[in-house]
Amino acid sequence: MKGQGDSCADMKDDASETVLQRKVAAQRRTLGAGAWSLSRALGRVLSIAADALWGLTLVARTSNDETLSADRATRHLGADRLLVILEHDTGPPGLVAFDRDIVTGLIDVQTLGRVTRFPSGDRAYTPTDAAMTAPLIDAALPRFSSMLSSQTDMAHLQNYRFGALVEDEQAASLALDADSYHLAVFDVSLAQDTRSGGILFLFPEPHKAAEQGTTALPGKHETVLKLAPVRMQAVLSRIHISLDRAQALRPGDVLTISSRATSSATLILSGGDVVAKGTLGQMNGFRAIRIGTGEPPLHKPEDRKPQAEAPTATVSLVPVATQAPELGYGGSLDMQLDDLATGLPAAPDPIDV
């Protein structure tokens, strides 16, 4: 028979348990019942997938979990890892990187039926090596999506899948075009530490403006700058002569230029930067340049074979203040040099300078 002291102790235990239960319930309400972090969910699904596929014991412990810019995130890839792009139908790609020992262990279990301790070697990775990781990736990621399906802040992580081998870190940095990435790094043990190494995941973070349902605002000077005039000149040809010969030029002197100077032009900004090159012509009473074709601004000698004209181009109209001779080709941009020369005044014999 319990005494009064025993009854008081039981009441205290019950009260303590009730307080703890209330604290746990409050914490669950704050974090969301059943909420999974990205790294926790990934580690869990990797273990489940390995066991379901091959009866392989895979233990994944999180060693790093943070959000970084794309440049900083790719610095974690390392030099001796198998890099695989994770494809997405509509979003930017992700990436997974495997240490060599983990790749060897996955190959072992699929070819030999067990994980061995044979040396891994140091050969270059091949698409076949990447394909041996595909079963684990394609078994884990759908489970990963399912675990996070009820969390709206994780909606961007849905529907990723195995993509293709990436040759190196530089190629990976070109493929990863999001602004920032969620980095999740795991220390992985296969078959009770028969092999161990790291697996690294990079998933793109959604753009902040997209998360808030708003679009990025233009800069405060954008409207004014778009209206600022830009001076652009159409240069038909350039020649180089010495300064003393240039100073010796007098009215009536003739400079020899390439005959192709009348059929091509280069659009140049006032600072000297080349905007585009094209073929000179006329359209609807305007001088016109077909962008994307024509000779370079400094023509080479006449015996040079002309280049074939590009099949597609963009037309830029350049009005002129003086009356230009009609070329008479019904708005076509194609010109014949002989017809153009007919409308020009006669010139004395050229003087080489």
Image (cartoon, rainbow, N blue to C red):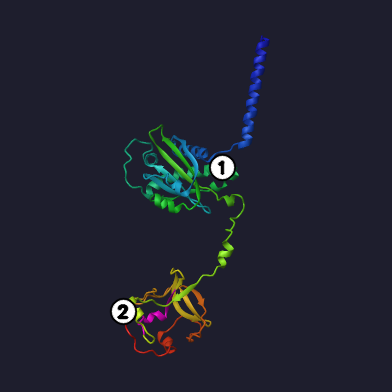
Question: Which residue in the protein does label 1 denote?
Answer: 148
Residue type of the residue flagged with mark 2:
Asp
Find out whether residue 255 is within the magenta segment.
yes
Q: Which residues are magenta?
A: 254-266
Q: What number is the disc on residue 30?
A: none
**Mark 1 to mark 2 CA distance (whole Å):** 69 Å
Find out whether residue 245 is within the magenta segment.
no
Q: Residues within 10 Å of mark 1 (few under 14, many from 20)?
A: many
The image position of residue 277, as x and y in percent, is 43, 72
Q: Is residue 227 above or below residue 69?
A: below
Whether residue 241 is visible: no
Residue in the picture at 62% in, 30% down? 24
Residue in the picture at 42% in, 51% down? 172
* Quarter the C terminus occupies: bottom left
The image position of residue 42, as x and y in percent, is 50, 40
- Helix, strand or loop under label 1: helix
State if disc 2 and disc 1 touch (CB < 8 Å): no
Residue in the picture at 65% in, 16% down? 10
Question: Which residue in the protein does label 2 denote?
Answer: 303
Q: Is residue 153 above or below residue 58?
A: below
Q: Earlier in the sequence, mark 1 or mark 2?
A: 1
